[in-house]
Amino acid sequence: MEHYTSVRPTSNRARALTHTSPLEVSLQAALDALGDPVRRSIVRELAGVPDWTRPCGTFTHLPVAKSTLSHHFAVLRNVGLLEQRDEGSRRLNRLRRAEFEERFPGLLALVLSEEQAPDE
């Protein structure tokens, strides 16, 4: 039996990330994405840090499973609110504030000004 030590299984991270432009997103899709309190928490936290400084792995304090958290990031990416890039073993995030604001003026400001509930 031969052993191939240099062969690695294909990982999900090997797939290219797709990013939707906010210009391609309907108002309903944006509202649906921002309707979830966990996603609003992610957006508020990203708004408070410089671009590309917050990895996905630092959101473990949110009250959801890791797989659910991945889903929330994908939803935010699919409505043009979030851009992600892989850097080594980390996936870094950038809030697409200017692009989203251009498409939906004032919507992001409402989310960012919302008082966070104690259970979020």
Image: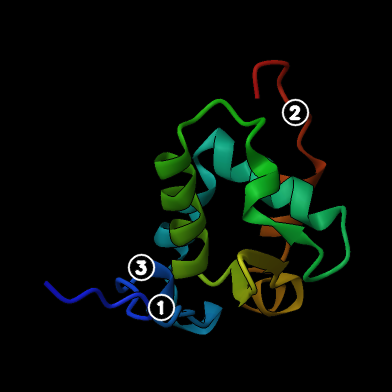
Please indicate, yes or no, whether residue 32 appears anywhere in the rendered image.
no
Secondary structure at numbered mark 3? helix
Q: Residue at x 42, y 83 (%)?
A: 16
Q: Amino acid at mark 3?
A: Asn
Marks 1/3 in contact by CB < 8 Å: the verdict is yes
Q: Amino acid at mark 2?
A: Gln
Q: Residue at x 87, y 57 (%)?
A: 49
Tag on residue 12? 3
Please indicate, yes or no, whether residue 37 appears anywhere in the rendered image.
yes
Q: Amino acid at mark 1?
A: Ala
Near mark 3 (Cα within 10 A), the count class, few <14, some 14-19 or many ≥20, is: few
As displayed, is residue 44 above or below residue 116?
below
**Front residue of this view, candidates 15 and 77:** 15
Residue denoted by label 1: 14
Q: Residue at x 75, y 28 (%)?
A: 116
Q: Residue at x 52, y 60 (%)?
A: 76
Left/right placement of residue 40 relative to residue 98 reads left
Numbered marks: total: 3
Measure how far apart labels 3 and 2 are at the Cα level. 33 Å
Residue denoted by label 2: 116
Residue 15, horizontal then vertical, whole percent: 37, 79
